[in-house]
Image: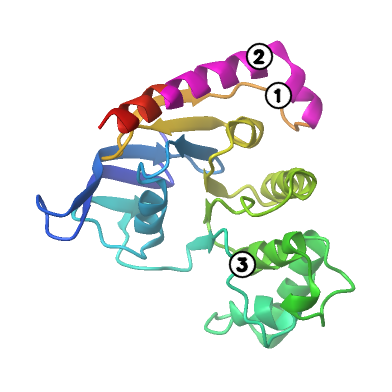
Amino acid sequence: MERPKVSVNHLSHWFGAPRNGVFVLNDVSLALATNEFVSVVGTSGCGKSTLLNIIAGLIDPTEGEVLVDGRPVRGPGRDRGVVFQTYTLFPWMPVWKNIHFALKKSSFSNKEKRELVSHFIETVGLRGFENAYPNQLSGGMRQRVAIARALVYKPDVLLMDEPFGALDAQTRGMMQELLLRVWEEHRITVMFITHDVDEAIFMSDRVLVMTARPGEIKKEFRVELPRPRNYEVMMSPQFVALKHAIVDTIREETLKSMAL
C-alpha cells in the first residue's frame, strides 16, 4: 500500500492552556494520498482553518503529529504551498516580483527562476499583467497571483483556506475551473477548506465533514464523478444526492452547536 503524502495522526489542539483553553480539535486523524484533491467542510468554528494551519506548520499542535512523506512537520516548509482567502500580496511589488519572491531562498538558478515565474504567469492566465501592481488587479486576478506564488517553487502539497470566499459567484466559478486545470496539469496533493458544498463536490475526490467544535472528522464522502468536470455535472442526480447528504450532515452539527 502506498504511503500517504500527508498523514494527520491523533491531532488535538487547544488555544490557551490545555484542558482549560478553547478546545478546537479533538483526536483528528486523516490521510491525503499523492495527487488527491480533498475538501474539508463543516460548521463555522469547527477548526477547519486551525487544522490547515497545523499541516502548514504555522501552528504547533497541542497533541498528535503531522507527517509529509513520512517526515514530521516542524514548521513551514517548501514541500507545502499555502493560499489564504486574503491575497497576502506585497502591494509595492508588481505581479512578477510577487511570484518571484517565493523563489528567493530556492536553489534554482536565476534562469530557472525567470522561466518558472513566466510559466506560472502563463498558467494562471496573467500574461500581459506581469508589471501590474496588486491595486490595479481585480480580486480574482490577485488570487491568481497568490496561487502562482504558492506553486512556483513546486511544492508537493497545496493547502488552500477559503481561497475563493471573497469572490463574486461568476469569478469564483472561473477560479474553480482554473484551479482544476492547474491541478490536473501538475497533479499535486490539495487540501481545500470551504463553506461551499457545491464547490467542495465539484473540485474534490473526497469531502470530509467535521463536527462542531471541538472538531473531529464526522464523515467522509467519496466523489465518484468523472474527470475532467464541467458545470453540467452539478445538474446530475449523483451530484444532487451527494450534496443533499453532505448538507444534512453539516446541518446536524450546526444544530448541535446552536443548542449549546
Q: Nearer the viewer, mark 1 or mark 2?
A: 2
Residue mark closest to the camera, 1 vs 3 = 3
Ranked by sequence position, the earlier of labels 1 and 2 is: 1
> Which of the numbered marks, if any, corresponds to residue 234?
none
Q: Which of marks 3 and 2 is in front?
A: 3
Q: Name the residue under label 2.
A: 238
Give the residue at x 73% y 49%.
168
Res 9 quadrant in image: top left
Please, which residue is most extreme toward the left here? Answer: 19
Element class at badge 1: loop
Q: Is residue 4 above or below residue 93?
A: above
Nearest the eye: 20 or 5: 20
Q: Looking at this rendering, what residue extends furthest in the front direction?
A: 259
- Residues at marks 3 and 2 touching, judged by CB atoms closer than 8 Å: no
The residue most toward the right is: 128
Q: Are marks 1 and 3 in contact (CB under 8 Å)?
A: no
Dot label at residue 87 = 3
Report the disc number at residue 226.
1
* Residue found 47% across the figure and 39% down from its top: 33
Q: Nearer the viewer, residue 107 or 82?
A: 82
For the record, the magenta segment spans 231-251
Residue 240 is one of the magenta-drawn residues: yes
Where, quadrant-wise, is the C terminus in this rendering?
Answer: top left
Is 211 placed left or right of 78 in the picture?
Answer: left
